[in-house]
Amino acid sequence: MRKRLLGGSLAGVLAACGLFAVAPWQSQATPPGEKTVTATLFEWPYESVGKECTDSLGPAGYGYVEVSPASEHIAGDQWWTSYQPVSYKIAGRLGDADAFKNMVSACHEAGVKVIADAVVNHMSSGSGTGTGGTQYTKYGYPDTYGDADFHTCRKDIADYASRDDVQNCELVGLADLDTGSDSVRSTIAGYLDSLREMGVDGFRIDAAKHMAAADMEAIKGKMADPGFWVSEVIYGGGEAVQPEEYTGLGDVDEFRYGGHLKSAFQSGDPGQLQNVADGKLESGKARTFVDNWDTERNGSTLSYKDGDTYTLANVFMLAHPYGSPNVFSGYEWSDKDAGPPSGGEGWTNTHEKQAVTGLVGFRNVVGDAELTDWWSEGSALAFGRGDKGFVALNAGDGELSRTFATSLPGGTYCNVAAAAPGDCAGNTVEVGDDGKAEVTLPAKGALALHADAKE
């Protein structure tokens, strides 16, 4: 994560950024398969993730679920304790190895692939007893790493304009692994391979920005089959390490995207999103998101606290062809350090809102259809996806009534942003043979029509 996002707290543990590598495998720069939408169930217990794959994610058409780190970590209630590993055993608050394997099996049975959040840049910032009973010291982790396995720059990163500083010094005091070491590379590769053997389909590489690209390439080269990778890379103007460097590994999280959405929707001019791809990674190499656990806390993006505007931003992301969308679904919080709820209450469940699941299905139907019929005025916008789909958003405070030009064939369509096909009474729209549709949208309302949701 960038220095100005880290502040003075361990919240920065989470942030870090991605990498590049030219591996012997062909880069998978978008999630492989026809269903490219990911749901990140942040800090959900593995058992609950498996159930959610069965009950919600699979039926909605999500292609992937990203789960929080599967490793033993420091003790504590804060969310960021998950990002301070002390061993590579699966023995954290989210569940053990059996729970993890059962989750992967359940998700696969539901048609959902699994991305594991992998924390391999660093270990802990102090000493103690881990969640699985491991007694550790900073730079000393029994049966995993010793002092010689860490970089010798034992001070915090001070200069993000220096590649050496960013990739060899410590991120907010966390013991920084020497990923240039062959033995360290082998240990990391072995850990990732073990997750692949449990059925994991790919990885989100945490803090990848703080590891040399050649190191990551070497780690990937030691693996039997590395699967799909996505690297967390926060863009920083003038910084030594940039997101474009890391597309050889797979997807890269496009942090500029969420900031652009926030600016567009909060300024009352969502029409500026017509050029949402400008100045960002190529579409086929970008993973897009409205927010994540870091950005919802530092205020750089919209979050669940923005209510209907947040939902509209997710609808736009899922409907627009740029990037591979990642729907973030976490929990409610007032304390930025607070860990996840212990029971069934307090989760935002963004991933299962009708406006979101309806648009997951929309994206699966429209595929790579071209962007057409763009229209924007004030706080509203609309666009089509060829003859496969059409979307309109009203981010304003008043009702919007308008006749829209679409490229859809004539017929009666279900508004999947408001209701599920087959249960669409009161939420249908007539499209004439000329492609025109008379629509009334309430304040903060959305319309989404697609070819597979005709009445």
Image (tube, rainbow, N blue to C red):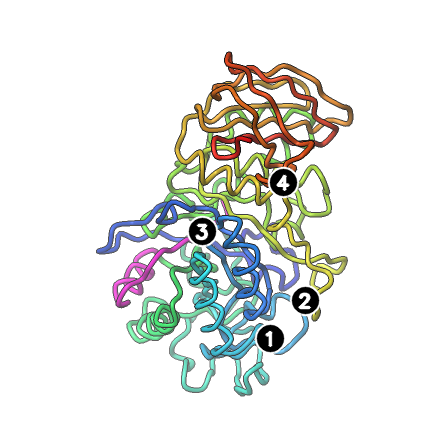
- Counting residues from the N terminus, which is met first, the one under dot 2 or under dot 3? 3
Residue 112: assigned label: none
Tag 2, which secondary structure? loop
Q: Is residue 89 left or right of residue 391?
A: left
Q: Position of residue 189 (x, y in %)?
A: 33, 70
The residue under label 2 is which amino acid type?
A: Gly
Residue 339: assigned label: 2
- Counting residues from the N terminus, which is met first, the one under dot 2 or under dot 4? 2
Q: Is residue 331 visible?
A: yes
In the rendered image, which quarter is residue 282 located in?
top left
What is the distance, in whole Å, between disc 2 and disc 3 at their CAs?
A: 27 Å
Placement of the C terminus among the 4 image quadrants: top right
Q: Are marks 1 and 2 in contact (CB under 8 Å)?
A: yes
What is the distance, in whole Å, between disc 4 and disc 1 at their CAs?
A: 39 Å
What is the distance, in whole Å, between disc 2 and disc 4 at their CAs?
A: 37 Å
Q: Position of residue 174 (x, y in %)?
A: 53, 69
Q: Which residue is mark 3?
A: 63
What is the distance, in whole Å, between disc 4 and disc 3 at their CAs?
A: 24 Å
Q: Which residue is mark 1?
A: 93
The residue under label 4 is which amino acid type?
A: Asp
Q: Is residue 23 left or right of residue 94?
A: left
Residue 232 on the magenta segment: yes
The residue under label 1 is which amino acid type?
A: Arg
The residue under label 3 is which amino acid type?
A: Gly
Q: Are marks 4 and 1 in contact (CB under 8 Å)?
A: no
- Counting residues from the N terminus, which is met first, the one under dot 1 or under dot 2? 1
Q: Which residue is mark 4?
A: 423
Q: Nearer the viewer, residue 74 or 416?
A: 416
- Counting residues from the N terminus, which is met first, the one under dot 1 or under dot 3? 3
Stretch of the chain drawn in magenta: 213-236
Tag 3, which secondary structure? loop
Residue at 64% over, 33% down: 263
